[in-house]
Image (cartoon, rainbow, N blue to C red):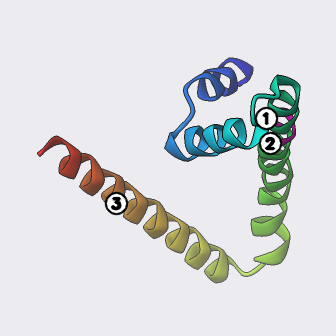
Amino acid sequence: MFLFGFLMGVAPCVPYVAILTYIACVAENDVLAGMWYATVFALGTAIAPLVLGAFMGFIPGKALKSSKLLKTFQAVCGVVLILFGFQLLYYVLNVIM
């Protein structure tokens, strides 16, 4: 998992590149300030998945005690993932064509 996280950190997605570019522009020739801003941003992006990951085991087990409600929750999450996949495919095809 550490290696996967490191690889994702080395090859960030477009929003991360945009945010880090903005951080570099805000630093205005102050290398230490730019490093500080990037470090604080990295800590924020590292803590969010840890907190959300910890609660993802709690939400379905405790909040959704009904088996029917749990199946509905899983179906909605699946549909959202499928929609994100179609959106990604649409944008990729627009770039290629």
In the rendered view, tell whether residue 34 sits above or below residue 91. above
Instruction: Indicate which disc residue 87 carries.
Output: 3
Q: Amino acid type of disc 1? A: Ala
For the stretch drawn in magenta, what is the main secondary structure? Answer: helix
Alpha-carbon span between mark 3 and mark 1:
30 Å
Depth check, front residue: 71 or 14: 14
State the SS at label 1: helix
Q: Are marks 1 and 2 in contact (CB under 8 Å)?
A: yes
Residue drawn at x 71%, y 41% as measured from the top left: 23
Alpha-carbon span between mark 3 and mark 2:
27 Å
Task: Indicate left or right for 30 with 90 as reference.
Answer: right
When asked about the image quadrant of residue 87, the answer is: bottom left
Within 10 Å of the Cα at label 3, are there few (<14), some (14-19), or many (20+) other Cα atoms?
A: few
According to the picture, the residue beneath numbered tag 2 turns out to be 41
Q: Amino acid type of disc 3? A: Gln
Within 10 Å of the Cα at label 2, are there few (<14), some (14-19), or many (20+) other Cα atoms?
A: some
State the SS at label 3: helix
Depth check, front residue: 30 or 70: 30
State the SS at label 2: helix
